[in-house]
Image: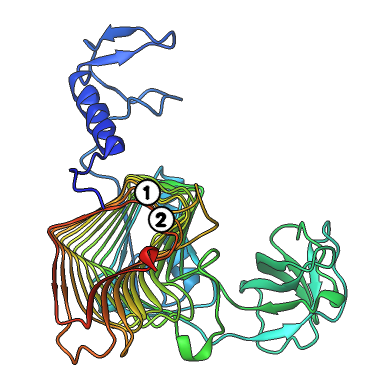
Amino acid sequence: MKNSSPLLSSRRQWLRNACAMALGAGYMVSSHGQNMPGTYPVRATDGDFIDEPDWDEKITVTVGPANADICGTTDKALQAAVDYALRLGGGTVKVLPGTYKLRNAVRLGSNIRLIGSGQDSMLIKEDMVRTRLSEDSDWFDQEITLEDDSGFQVGDAVCLLGKNPHTGGPLVVKRVLTARSGNRFKLDKGIRDNAWKMGEVEAATLFPLISVEDVENIVIEDLCIDGNRENNDFFDGNYGGCVFMHDANNISVRRVLAQNNNGDGIAWQICHDVIVEDCQSINHSHLGFHPGSGSKRTIMRNNLLQGNGIGIFFCWGVQNGIAEGNICRENNCGISIGHRDNGNIVRNNEVVDSGTVGILFRPERGEGFTATDNLFENNRVINSGGDEGVAVDFQGVTTGNTFVRNSLIENRDPAQRIGIRFGAESGENTVADNSIEGFAIDIQDLRDS
């Protein structure tokens, strides 16, 4: 094990870029790439979305059970407010106290702020209905025929789930029911997959409660979002969650309570510059936070993740992110990092009472696929797993990470519990100046076996 200081080159490059932007703040760049003195006042100009003034006020639309611009407690009322603000170039949707029952996702557009009234603004998913398709639908079709149409309504979000008839792989298609004749329903757009009965395809009213897809500049604050876990089937975090973000940039999620989802709490894929802070993600069957799929510069700060399958799950290619000041409590695994998750800083977190392992470095597919160049510093990992639990587990060929000045504590009987375990194939990682107390084995190095 090396004892050198961590060299996080990607973090330094980020800081260099920030300094360069600050130094160049007084200049604008021409279409030819040349710096030009910024001597003219910034004014709104038709067709120019770069030099937009920072307006003191934009449209605010209130939604609530009564005494609001839009009165109602369904996804339709919330979506109407969002769409109105979008028509005026963006603004704030203020969700007044109340319980809002959703049969479809609230889909945010660019430059929208969705602001609640704290936990008094509750968005809850309606009970799921699910049935088989009674007729085949080809990839170019824009309709489905349901075996049992009871419980389905025009306006519902549905997900087509089954097997791809050609490959045997999973079929997952998210759509909206827009019209019907009996048990035949039109979809908002074509299926673009073959949904055939031989693939045992079903339609289920599964969807993210808040959807942030293909947009930018989003703020979500002061809401309670409930996935109604007991009355909904599992829905994979690559497609849904209490909050689901995909191909979106510059997003802030603050003071949101995401709870009781049969899937993920807050999930984002291919999203850059996401900030999630002062939130709670509680009692989800899968992942509390799910940053994934190449997301860069994520910040997760001062959050509580409790009672989930995994607290914080760094998925694929999460880079140059920061996770600090979070509490991961009573999750099956506290923090998991793996597939090409590089250049992240994980510091000052508390991982307590994990079901199996506190911090896991996943084995992935071998060399070139595991996490590297990550700094884990000043974290506290307390009471991990059962009698054979592991506080920190380096699996596979994981190499090139720095794990320093952390406290690993076991307050129960030592049993067969392990502080740090290096797998038989584990590479060189810098592990130094850590405090390890109360374990049967402080450090187990299977490379020496």
Q: Mark 1 = which residue?
A: 372
Give the spatial CA distance, label 2 vs label 1: 7 Å
**Disc 1 marks which amino acid?**
Thr
Task: Give how far across and how far down residue 182 sits, in percent.
Answer: 81, 82
Classify residue 117 by image quadrant.
bottom left
Task: Give how far across and how far down residue 412 sits, in percent.
Answer: 17, 90
The number of discs equals: 2
Question: Residue furthest toward the front?
Answer: 449
The kind of secondary structure element at disc 2 is loop
Q: Which mark is residue 326?
A: none
Residue at the spot 65% in from the left edge and 88% down from the top edge: 151
**Disc 2 marks which amino acid?**
Thr
Dot 2: few (<14), some (14–19), or many (≥20) neighbours within 10 Å? many
The kind of secondary structure element at disc 1 is loop
Tell me, yes or no, if residue 300 can be seen here: yes
**Which circle's residue, 2 or 1, is located before the other in the chain?**
1
Tell me, yes or no, if residue 65 can be seen here: no
Residue sitting nearer the eye, 345 or 284 = 345
Residue 62 in the figure: left or right of residue 126 = left
Which of discs 2 and 1 lies nearer the camera? The answer is 2
Q: Mark 2 = which residue?
A: 398
Q: Quadrant of the C terminus?
A: bottom left
Residue 6 in the figure: left or right of residue 334 = left
Q: Is residue 322 above or below residue 182?
A: above
Residue sitting nearer the eye, 339 or 311 = 339
Residue at the spot 39% in from the left edge and 63% down from the top edge: 447
Q: Identify the image's colour scheme: rainbow, by chain, secondary structure or one colour.
A: rainbow
Task: Give how far across and how far down residue 400 sits, in percent.
Answer: 34, 47
